[in-house]
Image (cartoon, rainbow, N blue to C red):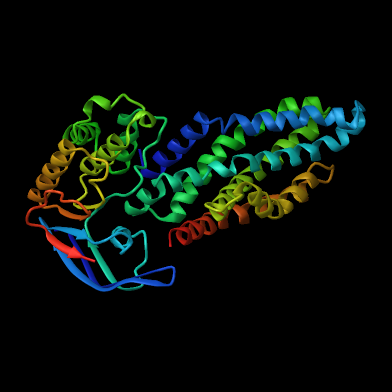
Amino acid sequence: MPRLAFDRVACLRGGRLLFEGMSFALAAGDAALLTGPNGVGKSSLMRIAAGLLRPGAGTVTREGGMAFAGEQAALDAALPLGRALGFWAGLDRVNADDVLRGLDAMGIANLAQVPVRMLSTGQRKRAAIARVIAGSAPIWLLDEPGNGLDLAALDRLGAAMETHRAGGGIVLAASHQPLGLDDAREIAL
Amino acid sequence: MSVWAAIVWRDLRIAWGQGGILLPLVFFLLVATLFPFAVGPDGPLLARVGGGALWMAALLAALLPVERLIAPDATSGVLDQYVVRGLSDEGVAAAKIVAHWLGFGPPLLIAALPAAVLLRLDGDMLLRLELGLAIGTPALAALGLMTAALTQGLRGAGALAGLVMLPLAVPLLIFGAGGLGDQGMGALKLLGATALVLTAIAPFAAGAALRAMRD
């Protein structure tokens, strides 16, 4: 069973204390929405959850694989979208069908042959979420997944998160806009 | 395909796509072409100093791709994605060294053939040069990647890279060029030892630099 737990985690950035005593635990099917004003440490908390930042104090427990969608799409600009996602599918040990499933879920299956550098901001964001969907990791960490998405894409994102949770997955998302996570726990920073 | 092989293959593909493989090669051959213009068409003189000049050229050619080894992957978030997948920084650095060497070492060994002709090196000298480059280029690749990781994200990283990398490469240059002489086997053994040390520590140094960069 996947699990993601923070135990009295503190975050220090550049000698400044962003937050401390952060504790929560997410089990299979749980979702949490991280909210708060700009600069309060939402992204830092996401990076701590992803293992990209060391917490200043406290411990983070992760059980299960993680998929992270951050500020950058991490897709090779020169490659067609399908092949750029295919590289990550190889690393995640999933196959081309899963990539298609991800593209389909975000409504960009028609862009598979288009080079990543030609994609718009919103399309790139959709592609990054498609990678998360395709990767089949139980723990989803989404940093501002709604940025740049239109309403239709937001609906698709909501549906994808719903499906993921129904399948026993965990979603931790940071956002300043509603994401359609109805019964999600809200963590206000 | 294993995860590491996939990373090596991706890096090689990108290096090829961005001219990262051809550019150092052209630079190396260009130096070999220009050198006779600078010292004059004196065959015996060229044969005597040509091997050393080619080692210099190899060293400088190794510096050219440093800027594109780490920085693009750091800014595009690719390195973050590796970490999230549980890949160690040292492992990623090692895979990048392998990819960098594959795109740099063998082509340089091939380019050394026409370069040796241009500089009038005889067969024995060419053999010793190739042997030395085969031993030395993995260390040059490892140093290049380590430098790329250390200078990533700094302003003027390109100029700084030279200052960081070239002093560390001095032993390679000394033993590599020393191996060109008639009594060169001893120098080649020392070159091997130096190359081994540099290649062995580079993934750890680069991995530590990548970790420090995230904090």
**Front residue of this view, candidates A27 and A176:** A176
Q: Quadrant of residue A53?
A: bottom left
How many circles with numbers are drawn on the protein? 0
Which quadrant holds the C terminus of chain A? Answer: bottom left
In the rendered image, the vertical position of residue A67 relative to residue A12, given as above or below: above
**Front residue of this view, candidates B19 and A160:** A160
Q: Quadrant of residue A75?
A: top left
* A83 relative position to B189: left or right: left
**At 68% across and 55% down in the image, what residue appears?**
B168
In the rendered image, the vertical position of residue A51 relative to residue B140, given as above or below: below
Which quadrant holds the N terminus of chain A? Answer: bottom left
* B175 relative position to A138: left or right: right
Query: Does any portion of residue B190 appear in the rendered image?
Result: no
Residue farthest along the front direction in this orientation? A37
| Residue A45 percent coordinates (x, y) | 29, 62
**Front residue of this view, candidates B215 and B156:** B156
| Residue B29 percent coordinates (x, y) | 72, 29
**At 43% across and 58% down in the image, what residue appears?**
B214
| Residue B115 percent coordinates (x, y) | 75, 28
Q: Quadrant of residue A160?
A: top left
| Residue B180 percent coordinates (x, y) | 80, 41
**At 47% across and 46% down in the image, what residue appears?**
B95
Query: Does any portion of residue A46 appear in the rendered image?
Result: yes
* A129 relative position to A159: left or right: right
* B45 relative position to A176: left or right: right
**At 10% across and 55% down in the image, what residue appears?**
A29
**Front residue of this view, candidates A95 and A24:** A24
In the rendered image, the vertical position of residue A189 relative to residue B167, given as above or below: below
